[in-house]
Amino acid sequence: MSQPKTVIVTGASRGIGKAIALEFARHHWNVVILSRRSEQELLATKQEIEKLGAKCLTFLGDVSDKTFAPFVIEQTYKHFFTIDCLINNAAISQIGVLTDFSPEDWDKMIATNLSSVFYFSHAVLPHMVHEKSGCILNISSVWGEVGASCEVAYSASKGGVNAFTKALAKELAPSNICVNAISCGAIETSMNQWLSKEEEEALTDEIPIGRLGKPEEIASFAYTLANSPSYLTGQVIRMDGGWI
């Protein structure tokens, strides 16, 4: 019997990250999940993963801390001996005009949403390059493509993720490592809980499919991409119900 594959999912205690972790668990991958501070939610997610018959490791820490990624990668290899897929999902958002942002707000947004993608990719790549195998999948946003008023910092961070994805894919293609991103539209997660009922209805009216996306839909597609042919790389694939 072949050794199970291993996936790392950042920001996996809830929302899209949790849905992705559970999707990979259903396919009997080893799953490593991370959260910044939601320990109880993280442990609850671990229990759900283990009920599906998959093995799970949890790590509590801040992805914007440059020392966290090397620690997670090292411990994962010690435990599972392989990392086949890295999914950079952790992100924060903040609504408001740019003049209300402080330099500290900006730094935190970029560190969490963009620098963390570098930290984790940088830590895992020596192993993947050695194996000439692996995939990196970045969870991005349509705002990284077209920008959003009152979400300038978030849009900039996700635009950086998209450029990072395309450039790194070219660099790693000779090593048979795929790098792609999912550009998410409006998804039913806590990031959108600030919307009033009226605002959500107005948003839904803008989306041709007539509803918000579900985390499970992103998760299913993430699993598909993790198992796609190696010729599919360097792509930022929009999943937004026809919205943009």
Image (spheres, rainbow, N blue to C red):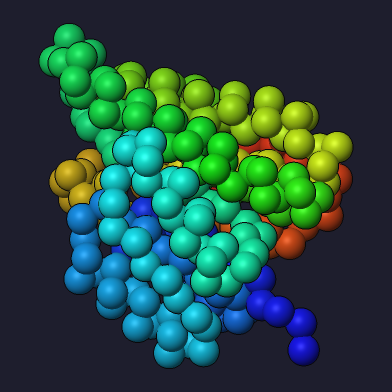
Q: Residue furthest top?
A: 99
Taking depth in this image into account, of 52 and 174 the one nearest to the observer is 174
Please tell me whether residue 45 is drawn above or below residue 35 in the rendered image. below
> Residue 152: which quarter of the image?
top left
Q: Position of residue 111 (x, y in %)?
A: 35, 29
Using the rendered image of the protein, determine whether residue 232 is visible from the camera's viewpoint. Answer: no
Q: Residue at x 50, y 43 (%)?
A: 120
Counting from the top left corner in percent of width and height, residue 3 is at: 71, 79
> Residue at coordinates 37% horizontally, 54% vertically from top-left?
11
* Viewer-nearest residue: 235 or 197: 235
The N terminus - image quarter: bottom right
Residue 100, percent from left and from top: 13, 15
Query: How many marks overall?
Result: 0
Q: Please say whether residue 109 is visible from this viewpoint.
A: yes
Q: Residue at x 32, y 21 (%)?
A: 153
Closer to the camera, 57 or 170?
57
Q: Is residue 182 left or right of residue 72?
A: right
**118 left or right of 195?**
right
Residue at image position (26%, 20%) is 106
The percent coordinates of residue 224 (x first, y second) are 68, 62
Relative vertical location of residue 241 with respect to residue 22 in this rendering, above or below: above
Q: Quadrant of residue 183?
A: top right
